[in-house]
Image (cartoon, rainbow, N blue to C red):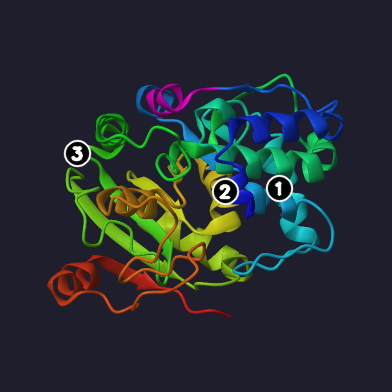
Amino acid sequence: MSIRKKLSSQFYFLQWMWNTRTLRKGFPKYRVLSLDETIIKIITEKTSISRFGDGEFRLTLPDYALVFQDGGEEVRKRLKEVLKSEEKSHLVCLPFGHFNDFDLPTKYWWYKFLNVYGNKISPFIPVQKTYGTTFISRFYIGFSDKSEKRIKKIVSLLKKIWENQDVLIIEGQFSRLGVGNNLFDNAKSLQRIICPPKNAFSNYNEIFEATKKYGKDKLILLALGPTATIMSYDLAKEGLWALDVGHIDIEYMWFLMKANDKMPVIGRHVNEANEQESLEIPKEFKEKYLKSIVLEIKEQ
C-alpha cells in the first residue's frame, strides 16, 4: 500500500505520530501568526517578509543544494542572518505552528521533515520572536479546506496588499507571476525584472542594485527561491517594502484549475510537478507580459 493510501487513514497517521514522537522531542514551539494575521500585518504595517520553507532550511546546513539553487558558505551564512533578523520593518515567516490546517499527506510531510531536520535547524531559529507563516504564498494545495469560499477570502485579503500600488516583480525566467490570471489586476502599475531560472544567488549584487533602482517607491514582490528570502531582508534594511511571495501565483493557478495535487501549468515552470507543460506563453497574454519587463538579467 502506498503511503498516500495509508495516510487516508487517520488511525495510521496517529499511530505513526506516536511511534516517531521522540524524533521531534525538544523542537521548540514557535509563535507563528496565522495566515490572516500575517497578511493583515503586511497591509497595516507595510512589513517586508522573508519566507523559510524546507529548501531554505536545508541550505542552512552543510553540503546541501537545491535543484534550482546551489548551496555554499555564503548562502548558509546569509540565511542564518535573516533568521535572526531584528529589523522592525521585516518579518521572518516559518512553516511551523499550524499543521492542523493541512491535509494528512501534508501533515505527514512536515512532521517527517521535523523528524529529520528539526533538531539540526532549531539552533538557528530564535525562540523569543514572533513569526509570520510561510504559507501566505501556499494557501491552497496542502490544506484540508480547499473550498472556494475559503480561497476567495484569502485571495481577496492578499489583493489588498497591492491594491493601487505600483508593483515591481523580481522573478525567475519562467515564473511569470500574474500572466493569464487576475491576481494583480488591481495594482496601479506592474513592472518586472527577469532573473536567471537557476542559481540566481550568483547574480545577487546585480539583481539587488537593479531592484533598488527600479523599486523605489514601489511594492517589490520577489519570486526567486532562497535569493528572495535573503534579498527581502536586505531591501527592508534599505527602507524598501519587499515581499518574498514564492509560489503565490502557482497556488492561485492551481485553485483556478481546481487541482487536487501539484500539477503542471501552461507557460510556467513548476518545479514540484511531475510533468511539465509547454513553457510558451499563450499568445493572448504575451504582448502584455513582454511590455511589463524593464530589465532582464542573464546568468553569470
For residue 164, the mark is 3
* Label whose residue precedes the other's in the sequence (3 or 2): 2
* Label whose residue precedes the other's in the sequence (2 or 1): 2
| Residue at the extreme left of the image, as rendered | 284
Q: Position of residue 127 (x, y in %)?
A: 74, 23
The residue that appears at 38% across and 23% down in the rendered structure is 40
Q: Which residue is mark 2?
A: 5
The residue nearer to you, when weighing 21 against 279, is 21
The relative height of residue 175 versus residue 105 in the rendered view (above or below) is: below
Callout 3 amino acid:
Asn
Q: Residues within 10 Å of mark 2 (few under 14, many from 20)?
A: few
The secondary structure that dominates the magenta segment is: helix
Q: Which residue is mark 1?
A: 57
Which quadrant is the N terminus positioned in? bottom right
Disc 3 + disc 1, Cβ < 8 Å: no
Q: Position of residue 214 (x, y in %)?
A: 36, 57
Q: In the displayed structure, does residue 150 sit left or right of residue 189?
A: right
Q: Residues within 10 Å of mark 1 (few under 14, many from 20)?
A: many
Q: Position of residue 176 (x, y in %)?
A: 33, 64
